[in-house]
Amino acid sequence: MTKSIFVLIMMSSFFAFGSQGPAAETTPPAAVTAPAQTGNLRVILRNFKSDNGVTNIILYNNAYTFPDKPDKCYSNLWTHISKGYAEVTFKNIPYGEYALAAYHDENANHRLDLSVIGIPKEGIAISNDAKGLFLPRFKDAKIQVNTPDKTIVMTIGY
């Protein structure tokens, strides 16, 4: 099986007030923009072969950094594994398009261990189970966060 390597707005209003006498020139109030909508993204990971170590779930909002530049991701969360499952929630993320990558850091060294030729030695998962010749593409892995609460399930593969 081939494995892919991964990986507000401030509002202000200004009003000018004239004094008694001739009308003073006034500046109309600035347009009021609604705050950006945000939601919580719950990620459930399943199919871990053991509860050893930890897992890192990486949230990307940019096709240029996905999946091989985790240091330039939007956010990432670490968590423990229990009974073959793990779960995290990314809170208050702006509505938009994202992609996720996760890996099972079995030895808890906080990195994805690779073979000499770059194949992951630890389990990985990509949103939408996206695959690619070398790396999965953002457009294949992207998900929409456009509701207050969204849940996705990802399966770790070894």
Image (tube, rainbow, N blue to C red):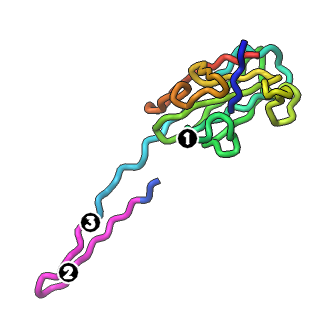
Q: Which label sits in the foreground, 2 or 1?
A: 1
Where is 88 relative to 23, above or below? above
Q: Which residues are magenta?
A: 11-28
N-terminal of the pair, mark 2 or mark 1, is 2
Q: What residue do we see at 33% from left, 65% from top?
A: 13
Q: What residue do we see at 70% from left, 44% from top?
A: 71
Q: CA distance from mark 3 to mark 1?
A: 35 Å
Amino acid type, callout 1: Asn
Q: What residue do we see at 66% from left, 16% from top?
A: 155
Q: Point out which mark residue 117 bears.
A: none
Amino acid type, callout 2: Gly
Instruction: Say few, some or many: other residues with alpha carbon within 10 Å of mark 1 (under 14 / 14 to 19 / 20 or more).
Output: some
What secondary structure is the magenta-colored segment mainly? loop
Q: Position of residue 18 (x, y in %)?
A: 20, 81
Q: Which residue is mark 1?
A: 62
Q: CA distance from mark 2 to mark 1?
A: 48 Å
Q: Quadrant of residue 122?
A: top right
Residue 102 within the magenta-colored segment of the rendering: no
